[in-house]
């Protein structure tokens, strides 16, 4: 039980975040990139400019595709699982080209542990397929994207572990971008092994009708072993989706939510408050900026989704990282290194910290309007921020960080 005398949701949330040890340093920005034509044919200068304008510190990429599956021609087929092997020869020169363009940007290789689009995977890993209540193997909406569950013991898990080793050895990425980390589009597997706690219950008799297993539970030990292996090699892990298990929270790997709906940001409020941009609604840099503001409504920061948005100027992400969250709020996030807000008010750290203030207009452009004020009260420095609709500000703390003075709910902030 987490008490919050005020009865305020945000007070409760921030107390619970402290209890869960969720406030650790978040790095970024992260930007996605497609590593196949026509994007792989971009000039070095075009790619470098996009990464610079997105202020990217990490790039997620490495997915490839083919057009043949079991001898049948398809418009395209993404290479997942064992299918990745067929795309490595095309990926390597593209990766080399992009590394020359932005040598200081860290590369995160794409990886998915449930989909396997290899030509023989459905036959090779039949016993490890995720099945429905009738025992029918399931897929990711298309027959050539069958779904499997990796474990330490099964054949699919062992083959997937070797595949991950190959990616680390041959591509030498700075880390892994692990898509749909806890589960894919299917939550439960009907079949062995049983997770020891899940089942379908008859709503009338309250009897267990059928056993089932949460995919996130039966794959937990395998995923934990792989994450520890990656980290032991000095690599990073960035993951898509909620973390679910405490053993992963303890490793402090950053995870984020896809934002086809902005409400999905709420899924990340108890761990790493990061929203991934939306490839469905973001066609322009202004669209992306509005999603940054939507993320702030939930106390979240933002990662760029992909290359569908090619900016013409830097924006709020330029001053967004690193950030070690202290307090999330409705329209703002207070971190040790900086405060990001789309709300007007007085902001500070409850001490004499000095800071720089950066204001962005409704298009996400840096501006010197409206003016901002610096106020000192009782030896404490505050920024007085007055923002117009769809404007935002980053208050960046100067290097001499002193101890943060806490009140009942965290560092001082007052929203108008």
Image: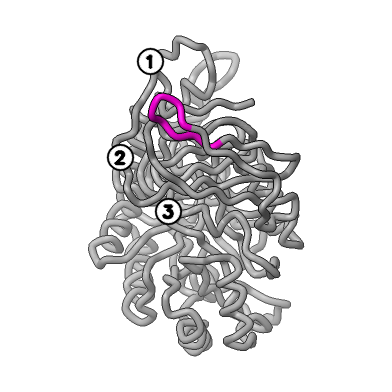
Q: Tell me how far mark 3 sits from mark 1, CA to CA.
A: 31 Å
Q: Please give the residue where the numbered disc 2 appears in the rendered image.
A: 402
* Side of 190 relative to 344 (left or right): left
Q: Residues within 10 Å of mark 1 (few under 14, many from 20)?
A: few
What's the distance in space between the residues labelled 1 and 2, CA to CA?
32 Å
Residue linked to disc 3: 322
Quarter of the image where one finds residue 311 = bottom right
Magenta span main SS = strand
Q: Quadrant of residue 250?
A: top left
Locate residue 416 relative to residue 326 in the image: left or right. Answer: right
Dot 3: few (<14), some (14–19), or many (≥20) neighbours within 10 Å?
A: some
The boundaries of the magenta stretch are: 376-383
Residue at the image position 38 percent from the left and 74 percent from the top: 173
Picture colour scheme: one colour
Mark 1 vs mark 2: which is more N-terminal? 1
Q: Residue at the location (61% across, 67% down)?
A: 144
Up-down: is 268 above or below 139? Answer: above
Q: Nearer the viewer, mark 3 or mark 1?
A: 3
Near-viewer residue (54 or 260): 54
Q: Do residues under tags 3 and 1 come within 8 Å of each other at their CB atoms?
A: no
Residue 283's place in the image compared with 117, above or below, is: above
Measured as percent of width and height from the top left, residue 309 is found at 69, 66
Of the image marks 3 and 1, the number of the one nearer the N terminus: 1
């Amino acid at each position: 039980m987490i008490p919050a005398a005020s009865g305020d949701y945000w007070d409760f949330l921030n107390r619970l975040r402290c209890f869960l040890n969720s406030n650790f340093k978040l790095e970024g920005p992260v930007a996605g990139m497609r590593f196949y034509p026509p994007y792989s044919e971009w000039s070095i200068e075009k790619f470098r400019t996009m990464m610079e304008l997105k202020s990217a510190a990490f790039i997620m990429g490495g997915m490839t595709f083919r057009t043949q599956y079991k001898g049948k021609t398809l418009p395209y087929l993404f290479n997942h699982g064992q299918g990745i092997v067929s795309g490595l020869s095309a990926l390597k020169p593209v990766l080399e080209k992009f590394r020359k363009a932005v040598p200081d940007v860290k590369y995160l290789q794409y990886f998915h542990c449930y989909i396997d689009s290899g030509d023989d995977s459905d036959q090779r890993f039949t016993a490890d397929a995720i099945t429905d209540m009738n025992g029918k193997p399931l897929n990711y909406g298309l027959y050539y994207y069958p779904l499997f569950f990796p474990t330490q013991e099964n054949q699919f898990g062992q083959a997937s572990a070797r595949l991950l080793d190959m990616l680390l050895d041959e591509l030498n990425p700075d880390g892994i971008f692990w898509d749909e980390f806890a589960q894919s589009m299917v939550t439960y597997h009907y079949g062995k092994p049983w997770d020891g706690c899940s089942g379908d219950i008859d709503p009338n008799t309250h009897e267990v009708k059928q056993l089932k297993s949460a995919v996130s539970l039966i794959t937990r030990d395998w995923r934990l072993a792989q994450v520890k292996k990656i980290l032991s090699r000095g690599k990073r892990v960035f993951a898509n989706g909620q973390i679910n298990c405490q053993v992963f929270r303890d490793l402090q790997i950053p995870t984020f939510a896809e934002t086809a709906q902005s409400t999905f940001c709420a899924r990340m409020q108890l761990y790493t408050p990061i929203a991934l941009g939306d490839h469905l609604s973001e066609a322009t840099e202004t669209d992306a900026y509005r999603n940054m503001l939507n993320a702030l409504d939930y106390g979240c920061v933002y990662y760029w989704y992909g290359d569908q948005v090619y900016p013409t100027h830097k924006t709020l992400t330029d001053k967004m990282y690193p950030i070690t969250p202290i307090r999330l709020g409705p329209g703002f996030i207070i971190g040790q290194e900086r405060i990001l807000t789309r709300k007007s008010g007085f902001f500070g750290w409850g001490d004499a910290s000095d800071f720089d203030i950066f204001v962005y207009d409704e298009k996400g452009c840096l501006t010197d309007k409206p003016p901002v004020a610096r106020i000192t009260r009782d030896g404490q420095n505050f920024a007085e921020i007055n923002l117009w609709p769809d404007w935002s500000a980053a208050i960046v703390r100067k290097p001499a960080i002193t101890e943060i003075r806490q009140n009942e709910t965290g560092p001082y902030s007052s929203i108008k």
